[in-house]
Image: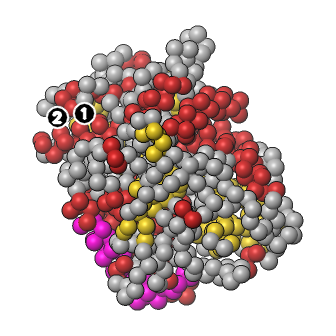
Amino acid sequence: MATGVAAGTSNFHFGGIRCKGQSCQQASLVSSLTFNGCIQRELSWSFGVSRFLRFQRFNFSHSPVSENWKSLRTVPVLSCLRDGSVKYFDFSVIGSGVAGLCYALEVAKHGTVAVITKAEPHESNTNYAQGGVSAVLCPSDSVESHMQDTIVAGAYLCDDETVRVVCTEGPDRIRELIAIGASFDRGGDGNLHLAREGGHSHHRIVHAADMTGREIERALLEAVVSDPNISVFEHHFAIDLLTTLDGPHAVCHGVDTLNVETQEVVRFISKVTLLASGGAGHIYPSTTNPLVATGDGMAMAHRAQAVISNMEFVQFHPTALADEGLPIKPKKTRENSFLITEAVRGDGGILYNLGMERFMPLYDERAELAPRDVVARSIDDQLKKRNEKYVLLDISHKPTEKILSHFPNIAAECLKYGLDITSQPIPVVPAAHYMCGGVRAGLQGETNVRGLYVAGEVACTGLHGANRLASNSLLEALVFARRAVQPSIDHKKSTSIDLSASNWWTRTVVPKSLGCNVMHNILRRTKEVRKELQSIMWRYVGIVRSTTSLQTAEWRIDELEAEWETYLFEHGWEQTFVGLEACEMRNLFCCAKLVVSSALARHESRGLHYMVDFPHVEENKRLPTIILPSLVNCTWSSRQLHKLPVC
């Protein structure tokens, strides 16, 4: 396995950060160091970042990826199935949320597309997005105002150029969705009804009641299914990206997947790959994310030598439904928390503690309309001070018909458990919601891995900075999915596929030889380890952190991962074995370690990252955190499961 290459030595450059009118073309740098005498717990399967860190300055600015590299051996092919386990396409799209589907519809005009999705196509974070999409569509609003709100919410860590691009191009992306068939709420005058959410200075949230993501997903899926150039492969879990090295540069040629229904490993060879796999909410025990959000894309990209950025900024949504406070308790624990949209507070919802004391004005002059990081920390503080399990969000003072028309999904869900939100407050508690960090992307969605593009929550574009402004996530996904189209087409035109490419990498296999009893024990232990990891992350890497808590998390995660890996191999697991639960577990470990390493590197409190021993914002630390590709590959477990081809 070749060692990682520092991004600063390649032709790829990253977006600059503006600081007080000056160009701060630098970044906090977290990098792995090569070392001898490796300690066992340092060398784990998921391999996030070495505990041996170095911090440097890193120059970067936006520019497209250079295309002056050797193409594959030239055998032109559009799409064919060589056999059931190898498939060839012009474009592979990993993920079926708004980013992946929008991109697929555009590139399908120029070639064949495989949309690879882990579960059913609709099962994505997009489908669970309640609030809406922010865009400047009102005459009294402006791009400059949207930009300012985004930058303020992002604690001034946002990339100015990215913010301007997204806020400027957003309205056109909304119009394209409407043209595709998405139906959004309109007022009596026939114009789009624009809601307001925390952190926004204007009404600019386009929505479909409280089920906006579901409506967008519906419209996009209908268009995708009817497109003859797009093939959807559901229940295909992405294992690892297929990469080669061209000198110091990693090049992506597709992805290995596991068909979880047939238990067959399927290899997709493609000219271009878009990673749109979503977030990593399930590194925490309570999250609004669907069960599929296990950080697979971020972990795969990290193993494939992609640069990762800003992983310390994990957004906890301040208001997830607290099942403990419902009159009728759910019969079983939810797989993901039920989200109470930001729009409830935007429509006048008020937060109270269990003593019915309104507390948000004590923390911020914007009260309930403060950005999410402020509200989440305020609720966390109330819960700890009062030793309570949840707080109350009350919208019942508003007219019943308005509540039911704006929040029908929330009203119906609460009513199932004996709670009428038109007359009773809603019990809420913070839950892990959105990763502001991810795979570092340029303005065209490009990464430092050639042929690999990213969009959506898996990407770190610089838009969100240290905290995502409400309803900016779907907006970012739409804009960057569209921006990645033209460079992807250009890359496809300059690349050909070799029909022998599928044989360049060793094959991963399903461990059918282990037997039912052994697999049962491995699955049982893996589920236990998953819960242990989530508990560590919530206790030590939650809403409020400290250097001591982060160091404790780092040590405990290393030990837990080493113990789990040892258990696997003592029970006959081999280097090339794959299984859904085991592969998810290594991705969860990888993402958890990336979060912890990034958090330890930031010695200040900014946005979503609050450190009790560094409680203030430090102007000289207004820089993104950069995690370079790993330089340490002492064991099989620190790299992709397949062996790289020898070229």
User: Of marks 1 and 2, which one's residue comes earlier in the chain?
Assistant: 2
The percent coordinates of residue 588 (x first, y second) are 43, 65
- Tell me whether circle 1 and circle 2 mark residues in contact (CB < 8 Å): yes
Report whether 77 appears left or right of 456: right
The three-letter amino acid code for the residue at tag 1 is Leu
Residue behind mark 1: 392
Figure quadrant of residue 499: bottom right
Q: Which span of residues is magenta-colored?
A: 552-577
Query: Relative to 621, does residue 639 appear above or below in the rendering?
Result: below
Q: CA distance from mark 1 to mark 2?
A: 7 Å
Is residue 576 highlighted in magenta? yes
Q: Quadrant of the C terminus?
A: bottom right
The three-letter amino acid code for the residue at tag 2 is Leu
The residue at 57%/81% (across/down) is 1
The residue at 41%/35% (across/down) is 20
Query: Could you tell me what secondary structure mostly forms the magenta stretch?
Result: helix
